[in-house]
């Protein structure tokens, strides 16, 4: 006979011991270790590698600044259009009264 008081045990990922922050920490440590190993065993000299990294960082920053500027311009355009539409709707509502 089956004991009805026994509780069924199901797998619960929250109680498994591995959470988001554990996985995130492992990923960050692995990334840093991979970067360090790549720099240690790089085929070019340290000076060339640093210059390359510096140029890549400067290029990424320039692209980021450009993307932010572009997003700002697009946001301002959307805001202007929405203000115009709101004024049209407002005038229609006022005219109906």
Image (spheres, rainbow, N blue to C red):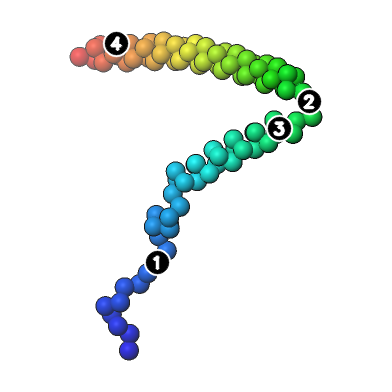
- Apparent side of residue 20 relative to residue 95 in the rendered image (left or right): right
Q: CA distance from mark 2 to mark 1?
A: 54 Å
Q: Earlier in the sequence, mark 3 or mark 4?
A: 3
Looking at this view, is 34 or 76 the one in front? 34
* Residue 5, quarter of picture: bottom left
* Residue 39, quarter of picture: top right
Image point 43% across, 55% down: which residue? 17
Q: CA distance from mark 2 to mark 4?
A: 68 Å
**Which secondary structure lies at badge 4?**
helix
**Which secondary structure lies at badge 1?**
loop
Q: Position of residue 70 (x, y in %)?
A: 54, 13
Disc 1: which residue: 10
Disc 3: which residue: 40
Q: Position of residue 34 (x, y in %)?
A: 65, 38
Disc 4: which residue: 91
Image point 50% across, 46% down: which residue? 23
Q: CA distance from mark 2 to mark 3?
A: 10 Å
């Amino acid at each position: 006979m089956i004991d009805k008081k026994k509780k069924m045990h199901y797998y619960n990922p929250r109680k498994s011991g591995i959470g988001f922050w554990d996985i995130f920490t492992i990923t960050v440590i692995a990334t840093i270790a991979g970067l360090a190993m790549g720099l240690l065993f790089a085929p070019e000299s340290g000076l060339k590698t640093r210059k390359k990294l510096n140029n890549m960082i400067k290029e990424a920053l320039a692209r980021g600044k450009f993307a932010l500027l572009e997003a700002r311009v697009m946001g301002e355009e959307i805001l202007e259009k929405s203000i115009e539409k709101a004024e049209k709707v407002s005038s229609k509502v006022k005219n109906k009264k």
